[in-house]
């Protein structure tokens, strides 16, 4: 495939911001004109209507929008000064999976370059009001996905999203955060430093202009991008009115697999997940179950090699520190946390992983002992 990039990204920026012209119309237009997008400027309304299969009224809106490109050109200059990238629908490096959905964004603003390996992506989402259980499971799943070189996609919201991004980064993996506002408007503000880290070991994406203030109406819409970038969506913890269920709904419409983590029937934060499972979502408790289910859709050549490399690097790191510290004498989780200076949620995921491997055992509530000298 030849490397194609739109010769006039300002055109896409203008169309994306034009009133009355949505992403479905822009997709039709750019699909119809292909590499000859410059021809749109010289076409009549009738020619645009016939070529792109849109109404004459819509063609009129397109012509009117493109009659003034000054704002779009200024926007493009501002993007370049900030060091951001613009991915236009139709470009050969526009995310392949996102290109397949019904209404892909005409423009994606990116904090850093997307990589080919980001094709192996799975979304991990959930409630902002996450429980310790939810955070631990989100950490364990995201860490496991990263160990297979799976890019973890989420929305950088508080709670489960934050845990998913942090855990992928801690495991040395890539992660993508999709914003409900512009790249210059980090939200929530408490995640400013996290988003900066994501920009270095992944990327932050938005379909909104860099200076656009996050708005409540933007967030449900951005969820179609989270699912659209991913082969599957994992809902870790969600109440019945959680925004994560909107992402799951988009995933189902887009033909992507939906996974849900079971929780207590007495916990309000698990009701959304239990409903998803009742409606056909695949119940999961770990990353390997997800990968085994979706393996045929992934670039399998990168999976096993990455897992072996991860086990060598990662297991000899954090997990080794824990094993070296533990002995046959019980140690409380707070003592382990303080001694090793680990985040409690991350430590919990490590302890769970080591326990599943049969290397440690949990006793007397929150105390752990070592079972092997390996």
Image (spheres, rainbow, N blue to C red):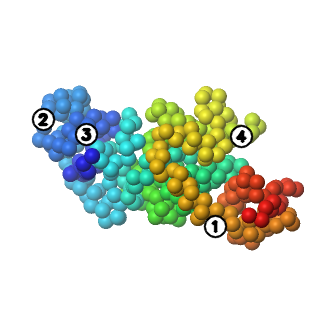
* Disc number for residue 263: 4
What is the spatial separation of the Cα atoms under label 2 and label 3, in whole angstroms?
16 Å
Foreground disc of the pair 4, 2: 4
Position of residue 272 in the picture relative to residue 91 (left or right): right
User: Helix or strand or loop: what does disc 2 sit on?
Assistant: loop
Residue 70: image quadrant is: bottom left
Residue 114: image quadrant is: bottom left
Query: Whole-percent x and y of residue 312?
Result: 60, 63
Query: Whole-percent x and y of residue 215?
Result: 47, 48
Residue 358 visible at all: yes
Contact, mark 4 vs mark 1 (Cβ under 8 Å)? no
What is the spatial separation of the Cα atoms under label 1 and label 3, in whole angstroms?
48 Å
Circle 2 crowding by C-alpha within 10 Å: few under 14, some 14–19, many from 20: some
* Residue for badge 3: 30
* Disc number for residue 317: 1
Query: Whole-percent x and y of residue 5?
Result: 25, 51
Q: Nearer the viewer, residue 247 or 168?
A: 168
What is the spatial separation of the Cα atoms under label 4 and label 1, in whole angstroms?
31 Å
* Residue for badge 2: 44
User: Helix or strand or loop: what does disc 3 sit on?
Assistant: helix
Q: Residue at x 67, y 34 (%)?
A: 274
As drawn, 112 above or below 247: below
As drawn, 39 above or below 82: above
Q: Residue at x 57, y 57 (%)?
A: 308
What is the spatial separation of the Cα atoms under label 3 and label 4, in whole angstroms?
44 Å
Circle 1 crowding by C-alpha within 10 Å: few under 14, some 14–19, many from 20: few
Circle 4 crowding by C-alpha within 10 Å: few under 14, some 14–19, many from 20: some
* Disc number for residue 143: none
């Amino acid at each position: 495939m030849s490397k194609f990039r739109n010769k006039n990204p300002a055109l896409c920026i203008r169309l994306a911001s034009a009133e009355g012209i949505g992403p479905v119309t822009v997709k039709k237009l750019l699909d119809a004109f292909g590499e000859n997008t410059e021809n749109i400027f010289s076409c009549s309304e009738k020619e645009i209507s016939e070529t792109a299969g849109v109404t004459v009224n819509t063609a009129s809106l397109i012509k009117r929008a493109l009659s003034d490109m000054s704002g779009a050109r200024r926007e493009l200059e501002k993007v370049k000064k900030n060091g951001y990238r613009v991915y236009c629908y139709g470009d050969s490096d526009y995310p392949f999976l996102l290109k397949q959905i019904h209404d892909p964004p005409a423009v994606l603003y990116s904090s850093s370059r997307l990589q080919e390996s980001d094709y192996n992506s799975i979304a991990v989402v959930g409630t902002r009001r996450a429980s310790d259980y939810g955070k631990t499971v989100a950490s364990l799943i995201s860490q496991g996905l990263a160990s297979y070189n799976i890019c973890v996609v989420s929305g950088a919201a508080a709670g489960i999203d934050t845990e998913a991004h942090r855990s992928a980064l801690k495991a040395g993996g890539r992660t993508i955060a999709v914003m409900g506002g512009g790249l210059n408007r980090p939200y929530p503000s408490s995640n400013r430093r996290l988003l900066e880290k994501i920009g270095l070991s992944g990327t932050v994406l938005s379909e909104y202009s860099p200076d656009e203030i996050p708005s409540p109406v933007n967030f449900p819409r951005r969820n179609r991008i989270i699912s659209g970038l991913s082969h599957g969506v994992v809902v870790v913890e969600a109440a019945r009115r959680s925004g994560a269920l909107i992402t799951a709904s988009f995933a189902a419409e887009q033909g992507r697999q939906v996974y849900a983590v079971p929780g207590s029937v007495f916990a309000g934060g698990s009701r959304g997940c239990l409903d998803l499972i009742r409606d056909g979502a695949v119940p999961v408790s770990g990353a390997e179950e997800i990968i085994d289910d979706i393996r045929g859709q992934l670039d399998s050549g990168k999976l096993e090699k990455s897992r072996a490399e991860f086990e060598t690097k990662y297991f000899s790191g954090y997990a080794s520190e824990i094993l070296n510290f533990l002995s046959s004498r019980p140690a409380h989780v707070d003592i382990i946390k303080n001694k090793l200076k680990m985040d409690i949620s991350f430590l919990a995921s490590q302890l769970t992983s080591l326990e599943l491997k049969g290397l440690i055992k949990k006793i007397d509530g929150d105390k752990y002992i070592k079972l092997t000298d390996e």
